Structure formats: C-alpha cells, structure tokens
Amino acid sequence: MKREKMTFNVNPETRVAIKNYVKLLGFKSESDFCNKAVNEYLTKLNCEENGDYINKILVQAVDSTIGIHADRISDMLFKLAVSIEKQNLINSGEYSDYYEEYIEELARENVQKRHGRL
C-alpha cells in the first residue's frame, strides 16, 4: 500500500514521548508509531459518531419499554384497588355475593372518584 507523506509539528515533550514509545513498543520508526496513533484516533472518532446514533436508538427503545410497563402496572394497580374496594363493600355487610356485577361497578366508581384512574 502506497503511503502519502505528511508533515506536522509537535512540541518537544511530545517528540520525546513518541521516541520513548517507539522503543518501548518496538515500532520500526516514529512514522509507523504516528501512523498507528492517528489510525487509532480516527477509529475512536468514528466509534463516537456511531455511538451517538446507537445511544439515541437505545434511549428510544428503553423509553418505549418503560412506557409499556408503566401502562401495565397502572392497569394492575387499578384492578387491585377495585378488588380491595369490592371486598370492603362485601365485608361492610351492605351487599352480598348475589350482586357481584353491581358491586364490581360500584367498586370501580368508588376507586375512580377517590383516586382517578391509577
């Protein structure tokens, strides 16, 4: 693969660090080290771009899932409140099991009056 020459300036501390890493990591030259470093950085930038897009998709998926579960929990709480209200009406002695449909409707109305739709 043909390489293109590129010249850039670095401060003296960076040059010393490059020389040290070339020796430490066993690169053939400073050029090889700098080429790898630039490629690594470009890969990082590319991942960050894609990561932002993926993060938005994940957030939307989580929000949607939470919304579905919140609706289900709300329905379950309402049904539980109606069931408890039915038991309270039956236990009060005013109503008997013979009026099950009436008690169900009355319990629903009582819960909605007291709490709204949970």
Image (spheres, rainbow, N blue to C red):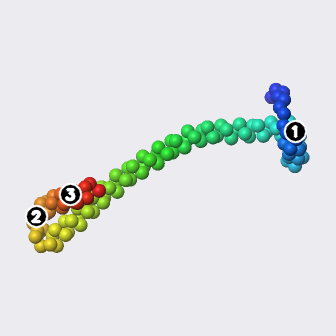
Secondary element type, mark 2: helix
Question: Which residue is under mark 2?
Answer: 99
Q: Callout 2, which amino acid?
A: Tyr
Give the left or right position of residue 55, taking residue 16 as reference: left
| Residue beneath the point at 46% across and 45% down | 61
Between label 2 and label 1, give the one nearer the viewer. Answer: 1
Q: Callout 1, which amino acid?
A: Glu
Residue 43 figure quarter: top right
Between label 1 and label 3, give the one nearer the viewer. Answer: 3
Marks 2 and 1, Cα distance to the nearest angstrom? 90 Å
Question: Which residue is under mark 1?
Answer: 30
Give the left or right position of residue 95, taking residue 57 as reference: left
Residue 44 figure quarter: top right
| Residue beneath the point at 54% across and 43% down | 55
Task: Work out whether residue 99 or residue 91 is closer to the camera in this orientation and state it.
Answer: 91
Above or below for 51 versus 79:
above
Marks 2 and 3, Cα distance to the nearest angstrom? 21 Å
Which label's residue is closer to the chain start, 2 or 3? Answer: 2
Residue 27 visible? The answer is: no
Question: Which residue is under mark 3?
Answer: 113
Above or below for 1 versus 46:
above
Mark 2 vs 3: CB contact within 8 A = no
Q: Residue 7: percent from the left, percent from the top?
A: 84, 29
Which label's residue is closer to the chain start, 1 or 3? Answer: 1
